[in-house]
Image: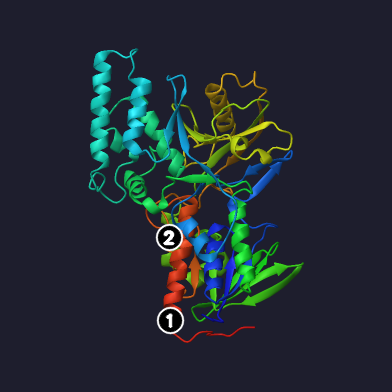
Amino acid sequence: MNNREHVVIIGAGVGGMCAGALLAKNGYRVTVCEKLNTVGGRTRTQEIEGYRLPRGAVSFQLRGVLPDICEEVGAEFEKRPVSEMWFWIKGGGEFVPLPAKSGTGKMLEMFMKVHGGGSKKAMARVGLELSMKKIGKAFRDPEATAVGDDGPTFREWLERYTDNEDLLALFHAITSAVSAVNDFEYPARHWFAHFAATEARMDKYAMLPGGFVSVSEALARVIEANGGRVLLEAPTLAIETTDGRATGVRIESDGREETLPADIVISNTGPSVTVQLAGEQALGSDYTDNLQKRIRPTPIVATYVVSDEPLFEPRSAFLAAGLERIVTGVPLTNICPEWSPDGRHLTAFYGTPKSCLQPMDREDERRANMADVRTLFPDFDAKGGRFLDVQLRDIDDPDVVARSWPGYNLPVETPLPNLYNVGDGCGPQGYVATPAAAKSARMAVDRILERSAQQPAGRAQHG
């Protein structure tokens, strides 16, 4: 295909780079404009004291929409598969391995092993087994959460089947680690949509020694190899519109303003910023009102720790149940030792704040997450542990973990027929994080290709 339409993409995150690579391979002239000095967006790498930290995504799914796109366009980068997931449950006293593909039944079996042993009274074990059977059956019921608009939260749904505090804590850790939202705030139906979307799940995953940014770097190479451009340190000032269409993107580059004429504009900045760039008048009040109702930025607390000895020995991520905030962690240098400049060990912990709807109490979040690290690893000081950084990314932070909660996304289309949104704020039901961003890119590109097939190529033929 030799389509000469010019596509300008705003933002070099996963969604924008996937869209750019797919379109470049289909013959479109692609220009990506990124305000930072690196591609990757919220999946870029950050350095503190020489340690390389994942700013956003850590795990790369080995099967699903994102690896499929990378294979299709020929984006290559090194992957290190991780075969296990481990669990820690408060009161269990140890980490327990669980193969990543085992599913809910195996998870509950593991839970019984930890909490249903001889220290439990017989009646307590019977009650726990009954709760687990009810939950397992409910998970297989497609109508379990078909109530109202959003229906019950996941916690409210789960409490129909159990009041066991340990089970509630276990599922809080699982759902929060996946969705980055507290289970008592997150609608159950959105969790079940994710549970059913096999293309979106992280059943098999890897870590990337080049950091997750290596995905966007590889996609950038595809764009450039197919005649496109990736402009760094080129912030977008406005999306220009005329007669109900996007006509160009005004950027700042090398200290000067210039307008890039465009037949198609794709925004990877999040729907809220897209409205700011194009103007509310251009997109209409219905669209902006819907955005205000739907979009819910997702906060996170990321805690990075350095230690003389590894806090956690396995080469795997882990989930933690029953803590104040932390729900998951990754011993980064167990898998990617080159991320440490001095041979010490780097571990990342991720916690959901007390509320994902309200601004954080920053001091309380810092206290709770640091205390959770010490609860998980009582030998923290003995192993030479120290806190490298505690990052409090609140709902108004540019680097929120997701532009919106899963299930609260906007469509990739906008009221302007040649302006599209991509990113994790536009993924379909059941998709979260980088799979959501990649899926949104696939959807936007499919619509662009469909429309191009229905009209002559090169509408504007801009140079």
| Residue holding disc 2 | 410
Q: Identify the residue at horizontal 27%, vertical 41% (top origin).
A: 139
Report the Cα–Cα distance between label 1 and label 2. Answer: 25 Å
Q: Nearer the viewer, residue 420 or 205?
A: 205
Q: Secondary structure at mark 2?
A: loop
Dot 1: within a 10 Å radius of its alpha carbon, few (fewer than 14), some, or many (20 or more) residues?
Answer: few
Residue 407 in percent (x, y) is at 39, 52
Identify the residue under disc 1.
453
* Residue 280 point in image, percent of width and height: 51, 67
What crowding class fits label 2: few (fewer than 14 Cα within 10 Å), some (14-19), or many (20 or more)?
Answer: many
Q: Identify the residue at image location x=70%, y=74%.
A: 258
| Residue type, numbered disc 2 | Leu
| Residue in the image at 56% along x and 72% along y | 24
Task: Name which residue lies at 46% across and 63% down.
Answer: 288
| Amino acid at circle 1 | Ala
Residue 181 in which image quadrant: top left
Q: Can residue 84 be spotted in the picture?
A: yes
Q: Quadrant of residue 111?
A: top left
Q: Is residue 456 left or right of residue 147?
A: right
Q: Is residue 185 above or below residue 30?
A: above
